[in-house]
Image (spheres, rainbow, N blue to C red):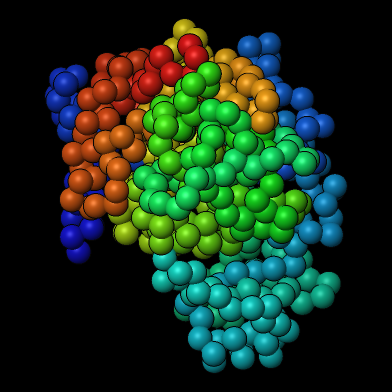
Amino acid sequence: MRFWTIFLVVLCLLFGGAGGHVAAQVALPPVALPDTGRILTPLPDIDAERLTGIGDRLRKVRLDRIAWLVRSNRDSIELDARGEPAVRGVLVASGVDTAMIARAGKAGFALIDRERIEGLDLDIARFRVPEGRSLARASTQLAKLLPQAEVDADNLYLASGSGGALPGAALASASGSGSASLGLIDGGVAAHPSLAGRVEQRGFATGAPAAGRHGTAVASLLVGSGGVQGAAPGQRLLAADVYGTDPAGGNASAIARALGWLVQRGVAVTTISLVGPDNRLLSAAVSRAQQRGMLIVAAVGNDGPAAPPSYPASYKGVFAVTGVDRKNRALPEAGRALHVDFAAPGEAVLAATSPASADRLRGTSFAAPLVAGRLALRYPAPSVERIAPAVAALVMEARDLGRKGRDKIYGHGLICGACGGR
């Protein structure tokens, strides 16, 4: 009960209204495809400044990208009933017992495995879809068969920024063992000098951890020091690679397991620069992590304002972050969530991209870690009593953009405006 009381206070801070700019700031803050180079490298980055009819164009880009992803990986990925990519032939359910599993088996849904996600106290079961049945049809049938369970596809969540694999690249590592206030759920992190000795990694997919450009960039914007400076320079980071070498990596199950690990390790603030659809398993995992004091920061994605709401950014209590250009205008390709809480630099952001390189990058992926790093400096350890003051302090730091006070485009305003080498 104590968590939910404080959570409501935070929601009031993030979403409540009050007269006047300062009052609105204080009485306000609650909080695209996988980073696999095989998938993203062949696709050109979007130069949003040159697009005309940007909403329609970005919608088409998104749909074409999903179609390409499925077409290139038909043996491991298919579309669910909403046209969203998911692990082929697999349904995930929580809240099931032995009798439910037996009932599902008699209807042709064979049990693949059962798992308890430690840290979240979440039990899940994975079922194989009957041969010749589509994921969309099977999901509806299993949900009717098990009305008391939470049944969904194992949806994929994709990197909200340019990325790519780094085959054979050395992984960043940590010196010794210890606690960390910051967590990252993304691809693997390469051994760039700005991250030396401070990144502990664990894999939650086949072939993970494996270094990637996207995960490396986000990590450097969190804790990088020296030539590539992060928002919380020099801090220790726990990085969960949910992609590895699996074409169907970045799925809801992998993200849930990663959240459980980070909760177990006492992480206070976790960055997720990935986007995808609403999903029952992901929703439950996010909620349980929040109940244990974790604050989650997520990017709104780069699929444009006409795209469907992005998750996990759209979940209640998750800090949804958009990106701005060098003139502090919202990126035209920035996606949307059901709420936007903060903005941060998202154009020409300097980030590490391999063991020996750094580049200027664009996208909301690279704005989210700047907010997360600043939040972690105010919230170094999970403690529900400290959530409200930490969030209030971050709101006070924000530079108001757009309409006076909190607005739907920039949230409470710009965080870390001088970060990212701007």
Whether residue 125 is situated above or below residue 368 in the rendered picture: below
184 or 391: nearer the viewer:
184
| Residue at screen point 84% across, 59% down | 75
Whether residue 80 is situated above or below residue 295 in the rendered picture: below
| Residue at screen point 76% across, 25% down | 44
Q: How many marks?
A: 0
Kindly tell me whether residue 53 is visible in this rendering: no
| Residue at screen point 41% across, 29% down | 233
User: Furthest residue to the top?
Assistant: 327
Left or right of 363 on screen, residue 234: left
395 or 106: nearer the viewer:
395
Left or right of 198 on screen, residue 28: left
Query: Residue 189 lies in what quarter of the image?
Result: top right
Kindly tell me whether residue 294 is visible in this rendering: yes
| Residue at screen point 62% across, 36% down | 191
The x, y position of residue 215, in whole percent, is 60, 38
The x, y position of residue 17, in whole percent, is 20, 32
Query: Residue 334 lies in what quarter of the image?
Result: top right
The x, y position of residue 340, in whole percent, is 40, 33
Whether residue 369 is situated above or below residue 55 in the rendered picture: below
